[in-house]
Image (tube, rainbow, N blue to C red):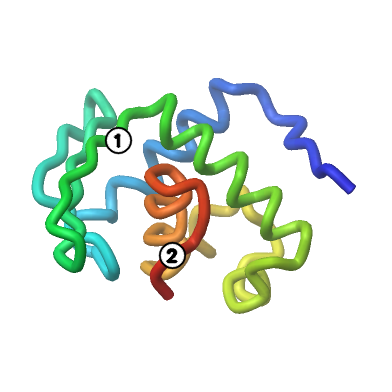
Amino acid sequence: MKFRIDIPDKEVDEFIREVMQNMPEYGESLICTSWKYEQCLYTFLDEEEGKKYKLDLPKLRKGFEKMVQDLYDGKLPGIKQYMPDVMDGGQWDAVAVDALVQYSIFGELLYS
């Protein structure tokens, strides 16, 4: 079943901005090499592949929607067990934010 987030885009965007402000310190699988919080622009380095990726708010929103869908489909049990309320930023730890970045870049969780 397809889960639909029934939250206004503006609220989702504000939420993404909030949780992404911890990303430079949270870098787990991808290293955040530059960031501009005000513009919600981030650059990541995948050391394993030697590639750089740039993320902005539209890409992060798309990754967020895919990640939330997979959470509710039971595909991310290791994250879901700690995040009963996905829109509670206090429940987002380094693993969850890293997953958001991976979903925004790759469309799935590659590194865990």
**Mark 1 surroundings within 10 Å by alpha-carbon count, few (fewer than 14), some (14 through 19), many (20 or more):** some
Q: Is residue 41 above or below residue 96?
A: above
Q: Is residue 66 above or below residue 26?
A: above
User: Mark 1 is on which residue type?
Assistant: Leu
Residue depicted at x 34% and y 46%: 20
Tag 2 residue: 110
Image point (68%, 56%), residue name: 70
Identify the residue at image location x=53%, y=64%: 91
77 with respect to 38 (left or right): right
Residue 9 placed where, x, y %? 59, 22
Q: How much space separates mark 1 and mark 2, taking CA atoms?
A: 17 Å
**Residue annotated with mark 1:** 55
Q: How many marks?
A: 2
Estimate how packed mark 2 is, as few (under 14), some (14 to 19) or many (20 or more) residues with alpha carbons within 10 Å.
few
**Residue 84 or 107: which is nearer the viewer?**
107
Side (left or right) of 57 relative to 31: right
